[in-house]
Amino acid sequence: MSFGKQDGTVRRKWFRTDRRCVVGKRLFFIIFALVSVFIFTAALDFAGFCPECGTKCDDSAKFCTSCGAKLKQAEGTAKTGKEAKTDADDELPKIVEKVAPSVVLVRTLKNELNAQYQDMGSGFIVSKEGYIITNAHVIDDPEDLEGVKVVMSDKKEYEAGILLCDYQADLAVLRIQAEGIVPVKFGNVDILQSGEKVFAIGNPIGLERSTSSGIISAKGRYLGCYEYEGLLQTDAAVNPGNSGGPLFNMRGEVVGVTSLGYSKWYTEGLNFAIPAPLVLDTMKYIPAGKVKRPWIGIAVQDLTPDLKQWEEAAHERKITETDGVFIASIAEGKELPFKKGDIVVKLDEMSIKKVWDLQKEILGRKIGDELSVTVLRNGKEMNFKVKMTEKPLQARFPVEDEVDIMFGATFSKGSGGAKIEKVRSKCLAVGMGLKEGWEITTVLVNKKKGGDRLETGSVENFYNAFRSAYNYELKYIEWEIYFNKNDGGEWSKYYYPWRQEYVAMNST
């Protein structure tokens, strides 16, 4: 009997164990079946099969052609496409809310021609000490200013002092006395890519805290009104009043300073920003209160098809190289081993392909540093050692080179003025509508002083008039030109109305 109890007990234990095994196996098969169904359904979904009726549908279809059910593949496509874009756009308001308090309105009260008027621009806080970056052209000439005021995002208004104006980079630094201000952070422009999303905050036509978004259209642009290259091209709206405001990446970091828009003259979306590295370079001169940049003393240009065509047509200089920087002139008073027409290809073994490559390298150097510069001269490679000196605020080059580069024309003596011999395809002269064979007879300059009438009966006189009209500090030429043009054998007198044109020598 005792044996039987033991046997029964044992059998009962094994029975309980078997039951647990059976339940476990059933649970395993149920889970396995569910997972299999899920995987199979998912496979059908992404293979283009309808999950409701199993009909094979086109991969691009959003709904089943048989039962009308929504296909999972459409949801997947939307998530990686439009929904992903929506997610990025959803982040923009949060980023704007975070960085907007660092953006300010800059108001300037100016005196001109015995009258006062108020101008506006934008700026942004770069330090807790109250330093603010804006464009130099927003400040323009400090001597004409009655005062500068800065309006914060909370409507508080502060008197601002002008610490420095960097006209070479079109940047100015202001300072206010305020507490609790939040400075911006700067981003890495080197990793910025064409097509990357950006946004600008500013005060167009006085509308405070306006935000516009777009993309980086291109990097490394150059316009004739700036001494430095490397401009960022963007389709984010830049209108009057936006100048001096920040251009942000989608991490809320400043990558540029909005400076110029061409939307009024060309198509919408052709706007430019000064790159962050140039802004940071200007900021390092804040303690001194004066910009002291190193330079070599050469005017440089990229090897564009337009330049090659002009050099061959106007100066009988044929250029076959594709990479490098063209030396267009040597600064007055500089004794350098270079010649006009040399092509810079290396700086201390660093390959130089564009002007911005050269300028970035020099911005990182100090006055007094010695450089090893490799150039091509008539196809032959040559190496020279040069020492960096301080870049003058009003650097001058031989006047014939200044006219050649900034105005874009060559001259000879005419019957009643300076006769235009050649006109460059993309230049100020073309923008004014001047053509070969016409004669410039008179130039009116110094508008603020009532205007000086300078006769240009010779080429030398025109060169002198050009220099009188050009402001080497503010980088603009302000004049009214009178000229004769030949209409069917008769000379007719015309004039180009008073204009202020921003144009600069691209020097380093």
Image (tube, helix red, strand yellow):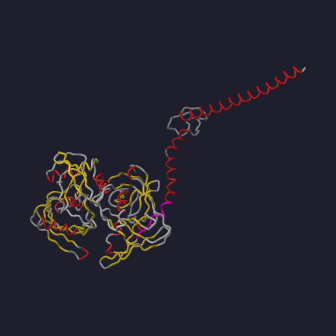
Above or below residue 239? Residue 73 is above
Q: What stretch is highlighted in magenta?
A: 98-106
Q: Quadrant of the N terminus?
A: top right
Residue at the outermost bottom position: 114
Q: Quadrant of the C terminus?
A: bottom left
Q: Quadrant of residue 19?
A: top right
Q: How many labels does the image show?
A: 0
Above or below residue 447? Residue 79 is above
Is residue 287 rendered magenta in the image?
no
Is residue 100 rendered magenta in the image?
yes
Q: Is residue 61 left or right of residue 288?
A: right
Residue at the outermost left position: 415
Residue at the outermost right position: 1
Q: In which quarter of the image is residue 404?
A: bottom left
Where's residue 313, x and y in %?
Answer: 15, 52
Where's residue 393, x and y in %?
Answer: 26, 66
Where's residue 208, x and y in %?
Answer: 45, 66
* Residue drawn where x is 19% and y is 66% of the image: 466
Q: Quadrant of residue 501?
A: bottom left
Where's residue 368, x and y in %?
Answer: 26, 59
Q: In terms of depth relative to the viewer, which is nearer, 459 or 359?
A: 359
